[in-house]
Image (tube, rainbow, N blue to C red):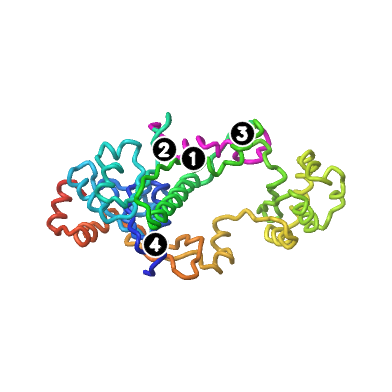
Amino acid sequence: MTDGPLNRIKVVELCSFVAGPYCTKLFADCGAEVMKIETPDVGDEARRRGPFLDDTANPELSGLFLYLNTNKLGVTLNLHSTTGRELFKKMIATADILVEDRSPGEMEKLGLNYDVLKKVNPSLIMASITPFGQYGPYCDYKAYYLNTYHASGAGYVLPAASPNADREPIKGGGYVGECDAGVNASVSILAALYWRRAGGTGQYIDISKQEAQMALERVNIVRYYELGKNPTRYEINRVRDTLLPCRDGGYVMVVLHPDKQWNGLAEALGNPEWIEDEKFSTSKARESNFNELKIRLRTEAIKYDTAELFHKVQSQGTACAPVCSAEQVFNSPQTQARNFYVELEHPRAGKLMYPGLPYQFSKTVARNGRGAPLLGQHNEEIYCNRLGYSKQDLVKFREAGDI
């Protein structure tokens, strides 16, 4: 295991599903020691979400859980027991960071809110990730991922360039909004860590999933504020992102604005005669005559295979990208050249290929060596070797339902 840039940082994770675990995964991948706490009975909700390896609904074989929890230690703990809460405080005493995603007020009811924990560890940075934040009229609302995504306004403009206003809105693919919240949480924690190292103290961070996703929709929100216009999914940004089907059944996305992009595309297509029509001579004209323009462009694009058209347009310096399937992305010469995929060993799942890290350090090497933990896999390591309890104590804790 190679030390990463955060190798001396200790993180306690009390999170489930995607946002919190993705936040701490980013720390673990950079070398921080992340101790993941799960409930003794069922553990992280992500364990019950597919896809599952070999289509076997086993909580140790969830692809979602396996990906989000690489390079972490895993323990079980019951915070509803007195002993469980005391064990938790002992973990916090030596931690740098606590990330939790319980409902607002729940940590206070357990006697484990920041005001209590900072007395145990004054330098603690505690981050709480909730759907709408710790205060405000929505703070106690129950919300799943679909709710917070659409509450941010992100889904209202998707799918972009809908051909008619009757097309219903959709959410982004996968759990992109949850990951956005996780990234925002990690950045805020790093900022607090930097401030602490510059002479500050520990502090509490309140993270709203809704606001994290709203931050990515700032252009549309500002457009409403400035112009009083409510952007919709109906034909939005038509000349900026245009999807063209190709001869082999694939698609490329091309950009038609500004003129430099348009001129490069025209050159790549061999400057067909219709290009000179006044209806397509300016960006404004192309927008006004977009439906006809789209038909013209599709007539040209269908003459080429996806890779062929992609390279022809790119060679003119115009933004263009193929719409890639999972197979194409996995076999991409670009990701292979950068060794993006890594093989990790897991006690139950065996050796699996994982998406790696989207960054490379020149002086330090990020961690990429440990699969996700089994439920309670590191109980003995943490409670006995770290906190000083005996194996007999561990048996008593387990029998009492504390771990």
Res. 133 mark:
2
**Picture quarter containing residue 382?**
bottom left
User: What percent of the width, then of the height, locates residue 32?
Assistant: 37, 60
Choose mark 3 or mark 2, whichever is in front: 3
Residue type highlighted by circle 1: Glu
Which of 276/51 is in front? 276
| Residue at the front extreme, as displayed | 199
Judge whether residue 181 is colored magenta. Answer: no
- Local packing at callout 4 (Cα closer than 10 Å; few below 14, some 14-19, many 20+) is some
Residue type highlighted by circle 2: Gly
- Local packing at callout 2 (Cα closer than 10 Å; few below 14, some 14-19, many 20+) is many
Kindly indicate whether the residue at mark 2 contacts the one at mark 1 (C-beta within 8 angstroms): yes
Kindly indicate whether the residue at mark 4 contacts the one at mark 3 (C-beta within 8 angstroms): no
- In the image, what residue occupies the spot 38% across and 57% down? 197
Element assignment for label 4: loop
User: What percent of the width, then of the height, locates residue 225?
Assistant: 61, 33
Q: Which residue is mark 3?
A: 225
The Cα–Cα distance between marks 3 and 4, rounded to whole angstroms, is: 40 Å
Q: Which residue is mark 1?
A: 211
Element assignment for label 1: helix
Q: Is residue 101 left or right of residue 309?
A: left
**Picture quarter containing residue 31?**
bottom left
User: What percent of the width, then of the height, locates residue 331?
Assistant: 56, 63
- Residue 213 visible in this rendered orientation of the protein: yes
Sequence-first disc among 3 and 2: 2
Which of 187/81 is in front? 187
